[in-house]
Each structure stands twice: as structure tokens, then as C-alpha cells.
Amino acid sequence: MSTRAVIFDFGGVFIDSPFDALVAAAEQRDLDPQHLLDVVFGPYDQDTDHPWHRLERGEISVVEARDEIVAASVADGGPEVDPFVLLAELSGSEIRHDVVDYCRSLRDAGLTTGLLTNNAKEFETFWRPLLPLDELFDDVVDSSAVGLRKPDARIYELSLSRLGVDAADAVFIDDAAGNVEGARAVGMQAVLIGPHRSDVPAALAQLRDIVGR
């Protein structure tokens, strides 16, 4: 099987994982990390009506999502959870240059590269300037712009269609297990990258084995 395209997630691949940042924030506040993940992100391996999922599909604003998450966090007597206070440290995230260099090497070698990200429209001014998108990718699919989010099969199919490749000819990398399984469900090969920077070399080695370069 030959690989013609590599499709990358953004957060957790090119910058530190928002999930890992939230776990760290929970531990600093003596809160249960899994409970905090559930409150802020909902069942992330599914595509539901949780406010974060609706935000990533572009159905509600970031302010509406925040207000719903804060309200839900105190509904059962728990502490107030403001997701954007907890995730504020991501604003200083450093780019993982080894991932950037590998992506660039793929495109220089003639492979097709894409970015497929679950994101919010209001976050564009933060994440888009962090990478030279036109230099690295043939196409960028932002969930909030297309009204779909991973792991919905349709967003992988949209990315593949826009890149002009079949699922069997593409490999996908993401830091969310459900998103990786979603890619495999449509026929792509996929790599799950761990949440820490120390996990990057192993993930890139796995990608190299699949891609052959």
C-alpha cells in the first residue's frame, strides 16, 4: 500500500495538547482531571450536543459555549469551571518544530499534506499565525468553517475529497483516540500521538514506518 497523503491534526500535534493542559490545571487545583475533561470537552470521542462540540461545529459562539459550560459545572454543586481560564496557558504554547520539519519534508518529497482540526472560529487569530499554513499544507479543514467535527466520518471524507486522495492512500495523526478511530473507520491508516512532548519522536517514527520516509 502506497501513501500519497498525510493529514495532521493541529492541537496536540503541532502544539501541546489542550487535554493535557486541562489535566495539569485540574491537578493544580486538586480537582478530578477526568471530571474536568468531561465538563469542558464532553465525550470527545463522540460528536454530541455538548457546548464544546457545538462550538467546534460553528453552531454557537465561544461566549455561549463558555456560559453553558460554567453553568453545567455548578449545576450539581461542583466548583465553577471556566474553560478559557484553565486553557489560558496554551496561549504561550511553543510550536513542535520537529513535527513542522517532518511535515515540510513530506511536501518537499511530493506527498500531499492536509490539516484537519476541530476548532472554534474565534480561535483563528491564535492558531493560524502559529504555522506557515500555505507552505505546509495543500488544504486546511477547520471544523467550525465546515459545520462538521471529528470523529464524524463526513469531515474525514471532506478532507480526502479536497486533497484528491482515497482513504486507502492516506494516513492521519491526532492526539484523540476517538479521532484516530474515526479515521480508521473510513479506511485511512492512523497514528495516535501521546499527550506529552516526549511522545513526539515515537509518533513520528510510526508515521515514517507507514509513509516510508
Image: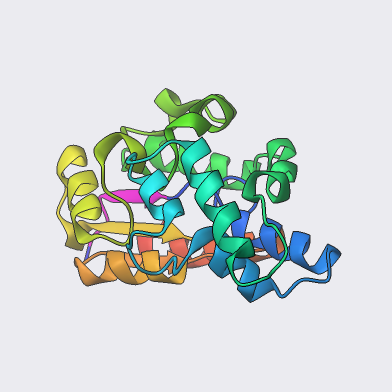
Q: Quadrant of residue 147?
A: top left
Q: Residue at x 55, y 45 (%)?
A: 66
The residues colored magenta run 2-8
Say whether residue 117 is visible: no
Say whether residue 9 is visible: yes
Relative image position of residue 43 (x, y in whole percent):
44, 69
The quadrant the N terminus occupies is bottom left
- Indicate yes or no whether the magenta region holds residue 200: no
Q: Which of 24 and 10 is in front in this view?
A: 24
64 shown above or below 200: above
Q: Residue at x 31, y 32 (%)?
A: 138
Instruction: Judge left or right: residue 193 versus residue 91.
Output: left
Relative image position of residue 76 (x, y in whole percent):
61, 72
Q: In which quarter of the image is residue 121?
A: top left
Q: Which residue is drawn at 75% across and 44% down?
A: 89
Relative image position of residue 26 (x, y in whole percent):
75, 65
